Structure formats: C-alpha cells, structure tokens
Image: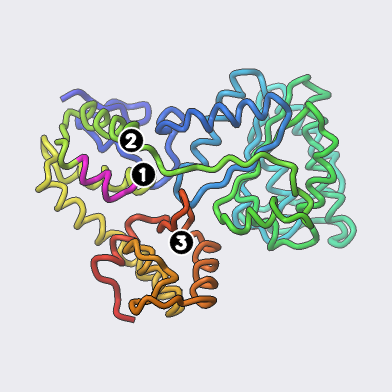
Amino acid sequence: MTPIMCGSATVGRVINPFQVTKPVAPAEVIDREDETARLVSLAEEANNARLVAPRRYGKTSLLRRVQQRLDRAGWVTVYVDLLGIVTLEDFAQRVERAYSDALTGTIGKWFAGLRRSLRPALTIGGGPVPVSASLDLGAGRREALVARLALPTRVFEKTGQRVHVVFDEFQELDAVGGQADAVVRSEIQHHGDMASYVFAGSQLRMMEMLFADRKRAFYGQTERVFLQPLEAEPLAEYLASRFERSNKDITEAALGALLDLVGGHPQRAMAAAHALWNAAERTADLDQWETARSSLMSAVEDELKTAWVELSSTERRTLVAVSLGSPPYQRSDGHSQGAAVARALASLEGRGVITRLDGRWLVVDPLLAEWVRLGRPSG
C-alpha cells in the first residue's frame, strides 16, 4: 500500500482520508468555485458581502479558501470568530486577537507595539470569553471597539496593503446589545478601498433580520452569497477519488446510496464516507454501506434525540411533514393547519433546522430527516 502522509511524518498504514471533526483545508473544499470567485471579486471591488449558510455547510472552509487567494494577491487577511461573544468588550478583544494572529514578521512586530497604544486598553484572557477589560466599562466600551475596528486603516497606512476582514457568526452581535452592528457600520463605512468585509452567519433568520430589515444599520450594505447543497457530480468525484487515493474502491451502487442519504450536505457527506471507508476492507459495496449507515446513525442518535426533545409538539409534527415531503400546512383530512404551523415553520427555520430551497421546505440535516422518517421517539 502507498503510505499516507500524516502531519510531517510518513506512516506505513493508510489512514481514513475523510475529515469529519473540523473544517477541511481550503484545497479540500468541494466545488464552491462560483462562490469563491464571487467573494474574491466583491473584495477586489471594495464591496462587502454577507455569506449565509446552514450549519456544517463548509462556510468556514470556503472563507479560508477566499482569504488564501487574497493572501496570495498581497492582501492582509483577518478572520474574526464571534461565536459566543457576550459583551462589546468581548467583541473588541476578538478583533484585536484576530489581528495579532494574522500579522506576522515585521508587520507583526509593528502591531505588537501599536496594540499597546490602543485606548481604552484591554486585558485579554486565555479562554474564549475574556477574563477582564480595563478602564471604564460604560462610555469606554464603544471607544475600545471603534479603535479596533479602525485597524484596517492603520494597517493600510503602514503597509499599503488592502485588508480583508471576515466576521464569522456575525449574528452573535444581536445578543450583545448596545447597537453593536450600528457601531461596526459607523466605523467601516469610512474605509473605502482600504478594506472589504464578509459578514458570515449560520442562523439564517437572524442574518436576514440584520441585513434585510430597513431599520437595521446594515440594510442594503452587502451583497448576499448563499451556500446551496453540494451538487452530486463534484461530490461523487471527490468521494470516489479519495477512496482511490487510499487504495480502496467504491461501487456505483454504494456511492449512489451515500449521495441519496446526504443530499449534498457537506459535513454529513464526509461523515458518511468516513464510516463507509472504515467498513470496507478493499471495496465498499452495498453490504458495507448498510454497515456504515447503521454505524453512522447510531453515532448521531443522541445528537438527534436532543434536537427532537427541544421541539414543541407542533414543531415536531411540522418537522415530520417536511421530512416526509408532505405539505406542512395540510392535515390528513385535507384541511389547512394555519397559523400554528406557520409559527412552527418560522421557529424551525430560525433555529436552522429547516430551510427553504427552490420553493420547498427542506430539513437541513439529512440524518435528522432520515431518523425522523425511520422511527423517532413517540414523544
């Protein structure tokens, strides 16, 4: 067997080539070339974008691919993860930390001095939620945030390089309060050609509220890029090639069954392929697929049960209808269910459980849809 590289060491065994626990490397992003090109083009035009995608749809990997291309074109790229922020101070610290991570070498040494001159000063803790923030936590909060949001102008003035900033999970700002999105816009609107931004998020309804509501600061300020499920053809080619490169084969029937189950969902496709690869010694056929499918569904059962028990009875009935492909507004006797189902649909969409695609409702997680179809808890 051909050895597979693992980190910097070569090992004598072939390892599973399908990554399931973290974002894949930019080079491993399947297709998404149109979305990549569009985001790069918007940056080059000094326009801002919002990238909207359900959870586990490869949003982070796509953004890394975009920033990798801009890096090669001479940009400074900064990635700010806003997941879990709770205060404006927390937001400011995430921004400062992101610049510290992004700027290396000579420019990194310059930034090491600059960050100590930023006012109000912040004390950055070691965990995802900062330990403390110095100075006044009232009026100083916005001043601290604005000082850090203005960093693209400082970088451009120092280096002449344009800056590309990603704010991932941008919808988290709504929980912070203090009109944080308005604070962001009030600063970045002055950046002109010096910087471009991508505001990314996985809570679809919240992202639409932030960017499509006329009363919000970012109304009409970004171009929307939405990630659809992966097309079957490039996904099939990717999966088959990874089996081949790791000295295994996959039959057309097994590959087709896998594609039918995952419905173009990027992470679930990797999880299913990972399970099938493990089940097959040399060739993955339908027998191995049934073993892999059973293993996969068992592995996610607790996760799916948790999602189920958090739903109201109306939301559960609505989810069942969507999973079965039935019109969710229609009862078995043919009468409309009306407002209650409309509220359930809105709630499920807001949580990212379902989404509307090509005029129909779709369960975002195909494994949840399969679990619901095959036998869910009676409660």
Say which residue label 2 marks: 235
Q: If you read the primary sequence from the N terminus, does the residue marked by circle 2 or circle 3 appear first? A: 2
> Could you tell me the amino acid type at mark 1?
Gly
Q: CA distance from mark 2 to mark 3?
A: 23 Å
Task: Give the distance between the C-alpha atoms of the residues marked 1 and 2, in whole angstroms.
Answer: 8 Å
> Looking at the rendered structure, which numbered label has been put on residue 353?
3
Q: Secondary structure at mark 1?
A: loop
Q: State which quarter of the image contains the C terminus.
A: bottom left
* Secondary structure category for the residue under label 2: helix
- Highlighted range, magenta: 255-264
Q: Secondary structure at mark 3?
A: loop
Which quadrant holds residue 203? bottom right
Snapshot quadrant of residue 281: top left
Q: For the point 43% across and 27% down, which residue is it? A: 27
**Percent from the top left, x then y, of residue 109?**
73, 27
Q: Quadrant of the N terminus?
A: top left
